[in-house]
Image (cartoon, grey):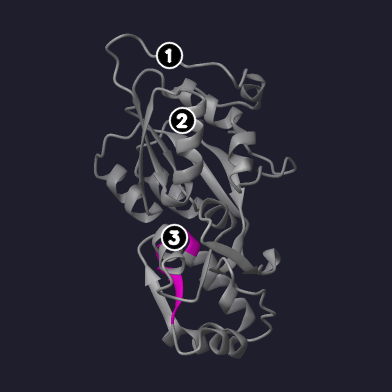
Amino acid sequence: MMSLRPLIFALCTSATLAAPIGAEPVTIFAASSLKTALDNVIETRALDAVPVYGGSAAIARQIAQGAKADIVILAHPDWMEWLSTQEVLQNLSRCNLLSNALVLAASANAPDLDVQSANDLITALNGERLSVGQLRAVPAGQYTRTYLSEQGWLDALRPHLAETSNVRLALALIARGEVPLGFVYASDVAAEPRVRAVFTPDAMAYPAIRYPMAITTNAREGSVDIAKALIAAQQVFAEQGFANVPTQETGRCE
């Protein structure tokens, strides 16, 4: 079992990680909100890795049930904590890889909104639905639920919600014009030219959004090197709308 320490940031980010001839690529199970950025990192860094995307809750359950993942990246620390209790993660392999922010998104030509109450959102919906990840299972939905609860808006908005099984589906509803508004991540907006952020919630009104990464107990050879390369690719992730985890946070890499 190997520990991911801060010194891995000194890796040359342009290095290609070649796998031994005949070796299978490393499998990365990752939260759906990472798709555009992680695909980009894998391609630009020529990593010998195959991503599998889904909702964090579904991914955690699949790995606990024996899915063959080498690296896992989730969009909420609670699901990684749960996965840790299932004894399927290597000790000392966990890092907070990235951070993100919650935004209210609309079509690309929509104006900014001044949202001061639940009624402001209901009026802007004009009888249609507000897309969100499932409030109790999907990380983006969990953050949204906390934010709306903190504002005292959740009960009024419940009848107007369109809950989805992952945040990219919530984004797709907005992009296709099936709903006028939705709560998604800042990185989702960066990945979809058909939408824009029209309102940014106060980041103090919901928990800090972190993407924990870990290596599984049955990870194949090369997994640690791939994990190191992902941590070293912070600039590529930043270009895709993600942010670094604040350096003042202790335990960034255990």
Q: Is residue 40 above or below residue 191?
A: above
Q: Is residue 137 magenta?
A: yes
| Quadrant assignment, res 122 | bottom right
Query: Residue under circle 3?
Result: 167
Check disc 2 and report its element: helix, strand or loop: helix
Q: Is residue 20 above or below residue 63?
A: above
Q: How far, Cα to Cα, is label 3 from label 1?
A: 33 Å
Q: Residue 172: x, y in percent? A: 41, 62
Numbered range of the magenta stretch: 129-140
Q: Earlier in the sequence, mark 2 or mark 3?
A: 2
Check disc 3 and report its element: helix, strand or loop: helix
Q: Earlier in the sequence, mark 3 or mark 1?
A: 1
Q: Residue 78: x, y in percent? A: 48, 54
In the drawing, does residue 68 fall left or right of residue 89?
Answer: left
Q: Which label sits on residue 171?
A: none
Give the residue drawn at x 51%, y 41%.
37
